[in-house]
Image (spheres, grey):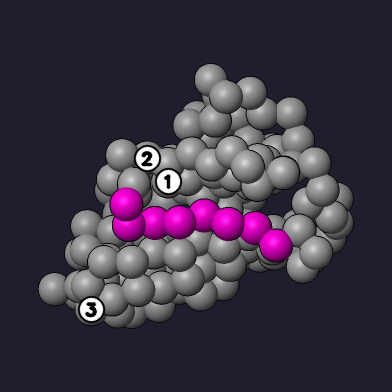
Amino acid sequence: QVQLVESGGGLVQAGDSLRLSCASSGGTLRGYTVGWFRQAPGKEREFVSSIRWGGGHTYYAEFAKGRFTISRDNAKNTVFLQMNSLKPEDTAVYFCAADSRLILSAMRDDSSWDYWGQGTQVTVSS
């Protein structure tokens, strides 16, 4: 059973960087697509980025392109989200998710993902 644990959130200033990690404590992520979503107060959860098992295919929301980079270390069973040039509007709880059968058209829909972590808070001050 995949059990996801996020880490790396915190309070930073605008322009700073953070690297979030998503690790599986219950089972291997082999064969899983892993994604990041975020939810700001009063807003719906939104897609940020995702990466296929092989790491060769990555996907980003428009707001993440050029600032965020997703990567994975399959040997360590961990996926990373490097976030640069952070803005106050990036403030949210960031969740990682995993799914073994996700199709491309469903990737941005949070209801399509099977496994979720508990989230990590990212706060960006101006």
By secondary structure, the bulk of the magenta-drawn segment is best described as strand
Q: Crowding at label 3, few (<14), some or many (≥20) Cα neighbours within 10 Å?
A: some
Circle count: 3
**Point 47% across, 45% down: residue:** 49
| Residue corresponding to mark 1 | 48
Q: Which numbered disc flags the more N-terminal residue, 3 or 2?
A: 3
Question: In this rendering, would 99 be left or right of 123?
Answer: right
Decide which of 51, 125 is in the foreground and name it. 51
Judged from the image, the secondary structure of the residue bearing numbered disc 3 is strand
Residue 19's x, y, as percent? 47, 71
Q: Residue 126 carries which label?
A: none
**Image vertical order of residue 77 relative to residue 97, above or below:** below
| Residue corresponding to mark 3 | 13
The amino acid type, in three-letter code, at marker 3 is: Gln
In the rendered image, the residue lying farthest to the front is 56
**Point 32% across, 52% down: residue:** 66
Q: Crowding at label 1, few (<14), some or many (≥20) Cα neighbours within 10 Å?
A: many
The amino acid type, in three-letter code, at marker 1 is: Val
Q: What is the spatial separation of the Cα atoms under label 3 and label 2, in whole angstroms?
A: 22 Å
Q: Do the residues labelled 1 and 2 touch (CB within 8 Å)?
A: yes
